[in-house]
Amino acid sequence: MSKLYLVPTPIGNLEDITLRSIRILQETEMIFAEDTRVTKRLLNKLEIQKPVAPFHSHNEHKTLARAIDTIKSNTSTVLVSDAGTPAISDPGFLLVRECIANDIEIECLPGPAALIPAIVASGFPCDRFVFEGFLPHKKGRQTRLKAIAEEKRTTVLYESPHRLVKCLGQIEEFMGADRKVCVARELTKIYEEYRRGTASEVKAHYEAHPPKGEIVIVIEGVS
């Protein structure tokens, strides 16, 4: 019977990959990847040689049927993203949904996802929280920000470094300059950083120190 494994990959530090993930990558017949170059670098470091094919946001609808045919022809196929758990803020969920529709078994391994260490280390309540992923760049962005402004639970966002200051400015605009936030940057990597404070304070810091790397924004819920 064919099976698709969802294998999380490290968000930075390669020591975070599990022994089980390494074994599945060694045993699988082929791997679908968000960026084949990124995945091949990881495989090379793990000394694993496997066929790697692209499955990303630019080709997912076009290649979905072909991907399903490939999975059906294999006993074991793996889906990975560039970093973290597949299908979290990437198109992997489309492949999972199509596999379920085709009675293909799914097995998801536990592993890294940037939102979890970000919210746990933020100091904000994390017993209940909302994950918004990436906000829309244009249409619908203000609507989402207004909803977050009224949210009592902690909210987690992903953001690109070149849009961080703009996003913090919009948090100021829609939620108030005193709304507390935590920006987690480059998690598990050499330059890992947590910047905590009000939206105004954190924005001022990154205006003076333009950020690089992967960004997670955690927003305290409204009182």
Image: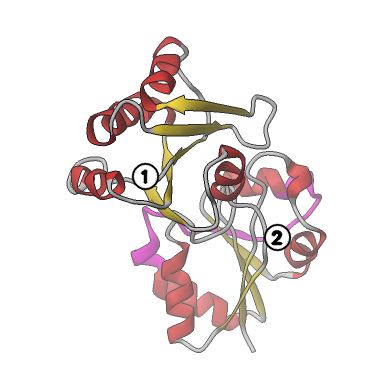
Amino acid of disc 1: Ser
- Tags 2 and 1 touching, CB below 8 Å: no
Q: Which mark is residue 198?
A: none
Nearest to the observer: residue 18 or residue 132: 132
The span picked out in magenta is 43-63
Farthest residue toward the front? 223
The image shows residue 67, relative to residue 102, as above or below, that is: above
Image quadrant where one finds the N terminus: bottom right
Image quadrant where one finds the C terminus: top left
The residue positioned 43% from the left and 78% from the top of the image is: 98
The residue positioned 64% from the left and 57% from the top of the image is: 8
Left-right relation of 165 to 66 = left
Mark 2 Cα-neighbour bin, 10 Å: few <14, some 14–19, many ≥20: some
Nearest to the observer: residue 125 or residue 18: 125
Residue at mark 2 to residue at mark 1: CA–CA distance:
51 Å
Q: Which mark is residue 50?
A: 2
Amino acid of disc 2: Lys
Secondary structure under tag 1 reads: loop
Secondary structure under tag 2 reads: loop
Mark found first going from the N terminus, 2 or 1: 2
Farthest residue toward the top? 208
Residue named by callout 1: 223
Q: Is residue 56 magenta?
A: yes
Residue 170: image location, x then y, percent: 27, 31
Closer to the eye: label 2 or 1: 1
The scheme the figure's colours follow is: secondary structure
The image shows residue 129, relative to residue 15, as above or below, that is: below
Residue 72: image location, x then y, percent: 55, 83
